[in-house]
Amino acid sequence: MTCELYVKNEKERLVPFSVNPFRESRAGPGADEEEGERPPEWLELAGDLAWTATFSSLTSNTSVTQPSAVWNYAVFFCLTWHLWATQTTYDIRYYTNDWWHRLLFASQLGVYAILAAFSGSFNVSWQVDPDATAVFKGNVTELTGEALDQNQEYLITKSFRGINVMLFISRMLLFAQYVRVMIYRKRSKQFWSWRFLLTPLSLLFSGGIFLGCFIMIKEDPDSKTVALTQLILWGIAVISQAIAGAFTPEDERQVLKSEGAMEPRLASLTVIILGEGLNAICGTLNSSMNSLGLSKTMFAQSMSILLILYFIWLLYFDGFRIKYSPSKLLEELWLCLHFPLHLSLILLLEGIKNVFIYVNVVESFNRLNTAFEEVVNEYNSSSLFPDHPLLEKLLRVLKMSWQQEKSDLQVAINADLANGGDINVESQIWRWWGTVVHNVILLYNSQTDPEAEFKFNEFVSSNNTALANDYNDDDTPLLAGFYTIYFEQMAYT
């Protein structure tokens, strides 16, 4: 081992608490040989994945089934994306391999984790659009309904308070990092301009805004004015940081030990977002293939999805290339334009997944309905339910067996006949079919709707007369009462 390699290894083993982000010598002889302090690749990847996990918690808890869900996506994504952008802007310039940054990186991961925990009840329609946050109560008593409303109010306000606190902590942590840079800048007698204060002051300003929002909600949680004011202040906080970043001057060349670029970080984040969306789509595809097999419709959908993703990748990575470093203002604008790009990608991939679910549910219904009509027609002519291999195969995915189901149906019908019933056949068949329809919907939808589930329970608990009348009614109001809600939600995409 050479002396130079030995010294380098010893330096890597000894990690100081804080390292000057500026080079000891200015640009000139020997400056290129001075070792840099680029953020390690594992740190960059870990930060990107931690941020993605934060937003994924919202996508897993919220389906795009109404306009308020789109606003929830946009606002929460804006809040979390600006955390990533401001932290990454700092890291590519001032990161050094020391315990100071390691501890703050761990703190930032904790902020992301807690933000993910508070995203479950995030709803920007709170106090703004009461219908979007209304809780379905069914036939509960008035006191129980009030308790449900109070619990919903508590969960939403707790989510907002927790998010505001975490945003405040995140801004203060980043502010502390910039203060440390200012101290080293003065010690090293580097280029100085009052505009270097813009970014830390904007962090202090936005942190005060988030803290103020926390106090407002805590003091007056039932005010529409407070809800609207919070949304406006959030926008001011994010925009102020973007403006400050645009007018903060650049350091001279070969002055910083870490002279990274934003382009590869944004490219990595774009790939991660595309991968997250593709992973969700593949999960839906897997469920569809297990239930229906690879149909022509599914194959055409899969090819369309692959083409969409391929052309997105082609346009982003091969369509536009920055050959020369733009001005600071254009660079900040280019960074900010990635926000609508990434948000559009997430909503696009979520929409593709939901369309995929919708089309496959419809195809499942068509296949099951055809088989159902065949066995009912056979029963009407022979008073016996026939064997049906295709129906047996389709029901197997629902953990049902047509052999067992037709035996149970026959037992139920015979029991009703023994009791003198005259409309038992239609009611028993219709109740069974409604249960199958419900199971198919839940096979593709991981989130249930309280109102739809209430109407389904009403359907299965209805008496034979009501079910028989529903069976003979072209509009089938009882059956349509629950599945129409799910279909409208899926069709919103």
Image (tube, rainbow, N blue to C red):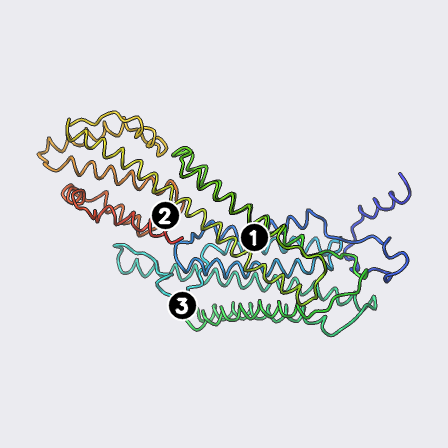
Position above or below: 82 against 277: below
Which comes before the other along the chain, label 1 or label 2? 1
Give coordinates of residue 306: x percent, y percent: 51, 43
For the residues carrying marks 1 and 2, which lies nearer the camera in this image? 2
Q: Secondary structure at mark 1?
A: helix
Q: Which residue is mark 3?
A: 128
- Residue drawn at (45%, 58%), measured in percent from left and top? 70
Q: Secondary structure at mark 3?
A: loop
235 or 368, which is in the foreground? 368
Give coordinates of residue 386: x percent, y percent: 22, 26
Give coordinates of residue 164: x percent, y percent: 53, 64
Amino acid type, label 1: Ala
62 or 289, which is in the foreground? 289
Which disc is residue 448 wearing?
2
Q: CA distance from mark 2 to mark 3?
A: 25 Å
Compared across the picture, whether 436 is left or right of 245 comes to left
Q: Residue furthest front?
A: 319
198 or 214, which is in the foreground? 198
- Residue drawn at (19%, 29%), measured in percent from left and top? 378
Which comes before the other along the chain, label 2 or label 3? 3
Q: Residue furthest left?
A: 420
Position above or below: 258 against 480: below
Amino acid type, label 2: Thr
Q: Which residue is mark 1?
A: 113
Q: Are marks 3 and 1 in contact (CB under 8 Å)?
A: no
For the residues carrying marks 3 and 1, which lies nearer the camera in this image? 3
